[in-house]
Image (cartoon, rainbow, N blue to C red):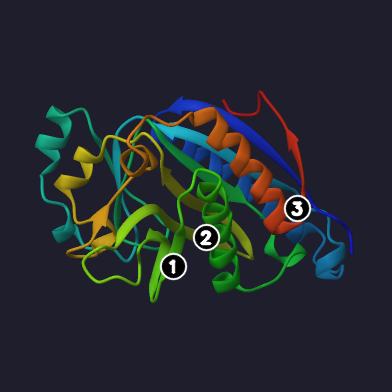
Amino acid sequence: MVIQKIQFEVLGLQSYKPVWEYQERLLKETVTLKSANYEMPAKERPTFHRLLIVQHYPVYTLGKSGHVTNILIDETEMAARNIDYFKINRGGDITFHGPGQLVGYPILDLEKFYTDIGRYLRSLEEVIIRTIAHFGLTGGRSTGETGVWLDADIPGRERKICAMGVRCSRWVTMHGWALNINTDLAFFSHIIPCGIQNKEVTSMEKELGVPVDFNLVQQILLQEFAAVFGVEMEPVNGFFP
């Protein structure tokens, strides 16, 4: 089996919209490339894989199946607090992105791996579970709820540390995960995160009691991503406009 290569790009702190548009462009380019070679077997068609790593300025994003009733402040108040707001085309409900949160957007051609969205999401969760384990945190899954949790099986103690939501077109993915490292959790008080009532959101900093080295988490996460997906990682720069 051919080992797939993923080009990853670290974008730093960015506004949400241009990164969303960048994802859309990369997805379109991949789908176009695949379509131009449709007569070839899926495993042999030329393609490319990308992974964007980014932090965002404060923003709320509402997924296509989300409910505006899970947003507890109006857009005027968001503007007053310098929080952007977008209705977007991923799965899932309302979530927050902000500084101190490690956001990952894989643009992968799943036909080079497996055509199973559920398995893909479990793999993303596994990347996060392995990453936070390096810091002594035991992550897990909550039945019927995508993402990574702490104490997911203890009623009243469940705490979500990483949210996930994806989109897939012609088996090419976009959107991804948001891991709370040193995130200001006060922003989550203005929404019902992911539309899930009576469960807390947490961060690595809150759980460990000290700020966490963001760059170290990023480095470990990239290593675990390569291990879970069985790929080679190649850094690239300068593609983002």
Q: Is residue 231 left or right of residue 57?
A: right
Looking at marks 1 and 2 on the same chain, the residue that comes earlier in the sequence is marked by 2
Q: Amino acid at mark 3?
A: Leu
Q: Which mark is residue 169?
A: none
Between 124 and 7, the one lying in front of the other is 124
Which quarter shows the C terminus?
top right
What number is the disc on residue 33? 3
Q: Residues within 10 Å of mark 2 (few under 14, many from 20)?
A: many
Question: Circle 3 — which element?
Answer: helix
C-alpha distance separating marks 3 and 2 = 29 Å
Relative horizontal placement of residue 115, taking residue 103 as reference (left or right): right
Q: Are marks 1 and 2 in contact (CB under 8 Å)?
A: yes
Q: Which residue is mark 1?
A: 141
Q: Secondary structure at mark 1?
A: strand
Above or below: residue 20 compared with residue 121? above
Question: Going 45% across and 51% down the picture, which residue do you hit?
Answer: 137
Quarter assignment of residue 17? top left
Residue holding disc 2: 125
